[in-house]
Amino acid sequence: MQGIYREIQKEYDDNRKRALDEAQAKKDAVYKEHPELKEVDDEINKIGVSMSKAIIFIDNDAVRNAKIEELKKNINELKDKKAKILKKLKLTEEYFEPVFTCNVCQDTGTVGSLEGAKLCNCFRQKIINHTYNKTQMYIIDKENFDTFDEKVFSDKVDEKRYKSEKSPRENILNIKKRSEEFVEKFSDEDNKNLIFIGGTGLGKTFMSNCIAKAAIDSGKTVLYQTAGKLMDMVMDYRMNRDNGEIDATEYNELFEVDLLIIDDLGTENVTEARLSELFNIINTRLINGKKKGIRTLISTNKELKDLMSYYDQRIVSRILGNFDVYRFFGEDIRLKTSGK
Ligand SMILES: [Zn+2]
């Protein structure tokens, strides 16, 4: 675990250095062609230093304020001069800014003051990807709202077969709309959690991936895992706290991460103890969700009543009260999207 932190921090240090070096190189190139720009920048920097000195070393209020006023006037004149030069060169100040991978932490990996510093979401996401998401994060580059194709869902209504007055296409478009809203209104108090129900190959995982990508793009942290693997990891953590697959910080992300996606909740390998661990996570997130604005998405190929038979009905129904349930139906889309 320490190793992965170091590894990621090294990547950040490299990215940040590269961004700063590139910005400096751009600046140097323009300076070389247009020394008048460098002169103005040097002047501005010099006055900046004089300003700090005045603030620190001049004791007399009146003298100090007069000096500061004078320096401010000089700086403003120089800034005007610089603006004119930039305009002539058809450049803006932004042109010289470093281009960071993450604008929030500027590729440092942390945000906040020294005492209150915490990991930036982008850094947390990398740890989560390493521990939990693994391959899923590569899939969301391919499976997202931009690549969503409703045409693979039939537009024929088949009430008898699907027990719905909607066609599979109408149904999936409705789910897609709600899924987009789910991300847009992510932490709104009235934004419920989601459950996707339906057989294999009806688009549940695809839609979960769409949501994962959109949430990450909007700066949220996302943890994706299948229910079976999640229960394995949690049981493993419980039994070998100190030398298991995940450590306490990573375990806590199950409760802290903005969006927890539990895929493929079935009844295979389910025991009451395992399910109890899973419901404990879901339930704690529901309680914290109000305060922290975190959300959970569950997809399952089982009818809810089947899950209920495995667990205390009161608890299951109370949990379900905090979820919007969407049913997926239609034909197996994997047959229509060859290669996906
Ligand atoms: Zn960041």
Image (cartoon, grey):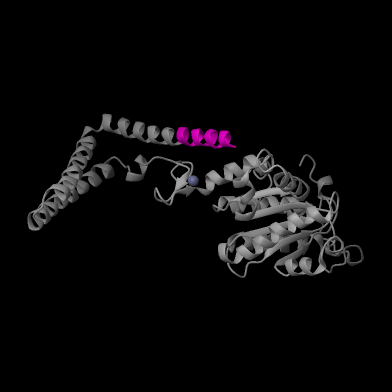
Point out the residue furthest to the right here. 160
Q: Is residue 200 left or right of residue 66?
A: right
Residue at coordinates 69% horizontally, 57% vertically from top-left?
281
Q: Position of residue 242 (x, y in %)?
A: 65, 40
Secondary structure mostly seen in magenta is helix
**Residue 241 in sight:** yes
Q: Is residue 7 left or right of residue 141?
A: left
Decide which of 209, 54 is in the foreground and name it.
54
Magenta-tinted stretch: 1-15
- The quarter of the displayed image where residue 207 is located: bottom right
**Residue 145 in sight:** no
Residue at coordinates 48% horizontally, 44% vertically from top-left?
102
Q: Position of residue 172 (x, y in %)?
A: 75, 59
Q: Is residue 125 above or below residue 38?
A: below
Figure disc tally:
0
Q: Position of residue 236 (x, y in %)?
A: 73, 44
Q: Is residue 78 magenta?
A: no
Pick the quarter of the image with the N terminus: top right
Residue at coordinates 54% horizontally, 52% vertically from top-left?
219
Q: Position of residue 189 (x, y in %)?
A: 59, 69
Decide which of 221, 196 is in the foreground and name it.
221
Residue at coordinates 71% horizontally, 66% vertically from top-left?
323
Q: Is residue 287 left or right of residue 308?
A: left
